Every structure is written in structure tokens, then in C-alpha cells.
Amino acid sequence: MNRFACQYAIIRFLPYAETGEFANVGVVLACPATGYLGARLMPARKTGRITGFFEQLDKRIYREAMAYLKEELSRIGKLVADRGASNPTFVQQSFAGLVRPREALLRFGETRVILADQPKDTLSKLFATIVERDFADRTYHDQILVRGVRETLRKANLRDYFRPADIGDQDLHIHVPFVHEREGHPQLAIKPLDLAKDEPNQVYDVGSRWVGRVRLLQRHKLLPEGMLFAVNMPDAKHKRARMAVEEILGDLRGNAAVQAVPITDMAAITAFAKTAAATD
């Protein structure tokens, strides 16, 4: 697969030039070789991070600045889509003009280079890492969920029956923090799953990966006899996200070997784990 040299810049919101403090709110990426120029912006309606960092700021100022930049990005994106496919120089010039130094609330960081086979996918990954900080959030929340399940098992005197292990074989495997083995083979597995998202699309993004993994393991006859997903649920106020979670849970439960319960249901987790003691 071909990989192309792309340029990208981080979009920063800097309301007070005197302090130099800023928040990352977007990413723009250009790939002259493929005629691509695209950008991802943090939704203007989500102002919690901005007002939390800049406490005295009127959030209307941020929203208006983001709306203006969104229009500019859309205009330049259309120009590149029309003329950039056969004109790499035009893509490069458009990107350079867009990210030029400026005195404004929204500024562009230094230009960086990255290799990509799919520029649009690379843009999404950069946005998730740089703006959404998914790596930190995911690791932090996963650790909290794992500690919660571990404490549930400890209170039920079942902690020693489970350990972190891989399920599958050398060609297809997943790592699970709680696995009970018998004669060297996984028999039971408990996987904390964080689906406490605000948006349905985020739920589908995470949940569908695990639905797919379960189906693959089942197809290759690599699933343990029982697997429990202890699911961190969205807040009740996020009704559409909770509906998406129920859909994902329905897909997981479609496999006879798989159970899925809220991570707060300690009784259900304990009951599942007790079968490890009963079979030893």
C-alpha cells in the first residue's frame, strides 16, 4: 500500500495573547500527492473544556470564532476538491496560506509531516489523539474499571481465580484483565468495557470493535466457555447514547457464551465469577 507525505497543523484557541495559554481545538491536514485537504474541529457547542480552562471567557466568543473558521475551512476545502486532484502545488499553496501566522483567537501551530496511506483516516486519528486525548482518557478510565472489577472479586474471595491473559491463538487474540484457566486453557473471562460516552457514534465506534472481535473468536472456536462484559453505561441524560449501548449489548449477547451486565451490577459479576470456584 502506498504511503504519502502529508502536512498537518494543530489549530489552537488562544484568547489571551498576553499569557500565551491555548487549547487545542482542531487539526488540518493536507496531502498534495492525493489532492486532499481536510480539517477536524471540536464541536463549537462543546464549551466545557474551554470555559473550564479560561474561566472568565464569554463562551459566545469561542463559538463565533469557531463558526468563522469552519466557514473558511469549508471554502478552502471546496476549492481544493475542485482543483487539487491534478494540481499538488495548489494543495500545498492552499495549506500554506491557511496555516500562515496570524494574530487571531484561532491560530495554527507549526507545520508537521506524517506519512499516511489514507489521509482522511490519519486526520481522524490525529484529532482523536491531539484534541480528544483519547489515549489518556481511554487508559485512565480502563484502569478505573479494572480496579472496580478487581475489588468486586476480592470482596467475594474470588480474586485468586483470575489473572490477566490472552484469549485466542498466535494469529488471533485479545488481552483480557480477568481470565480463569483450567489445564492451561481459558474457561472464563471478564472484560470491563467502557461505553459511557456522550454520543451514539462514540458508543458504536468502541462497541462495534468488541462485537467484531467476539464474532471472530467464535468463528475460529477460540472463545472461552463463558465471557462476561462488565459495561460502564452512559449517564441517563444521554438517552441516544444509552440506546446505542443497548444495541451493542444485544449484539454481544447474541452469542450464547457471552453475557453483558452493567459494571455496577456486582451481584451479577460475582455470580459469574463463582463458577470458576465451582469448577475447580
Image (spheres, rainbow, N blue to C red):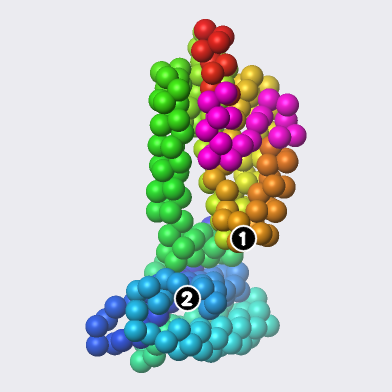
User: What is the C-alpha distance between the residues marked 1 and 2?
Assistant: 17 Å
For residue 107, the mark is: none
Residue with the most extreme left position: 19
Which is more foreground, mark 1 or mark 2? 1
The answer to whether residue 51 is above or below residue 236 is below
Picture disc at residue 238: 1
The secondary element bearing badge 2 is classed as: loop
Marks 1 and 2 close (CB-CB < 8 Å): no
Residue drawn at (63%, 23%), measured in percent from left and top? 226
Tag 2 or tag 1, which sits nearer the N-term? 2
Residue 137, given in percent of the width and then of the height, sits at 43, 54
In this view, 40 is above or below 57: above
Q: Can residue 261 be seen in this view?
A: yes
- The tag on residue 47 is 2
x then y, percent, for residue 61:
45, 89
Q: For label 1, count other residues whose C-alpha is less than 10 Å away and answer few (under 14), some (14-19) or many (20+).
A: some
Q: Position of residue 192 (x, y in %)?
A: 52, 38
> x%, y% of residue 105?
40, 87
Task: Give the amino acid type for the residue marked by disc 2 in the picture.
Answer: Thr
Residue type, mark 1 in image: His
Q: Does the magenta stretch include residue 89?
A: no
Q: In which quarter of the image is residue 53?
A: bottom left
Task: Find the magenta span and give its range.
Answer: 253-271
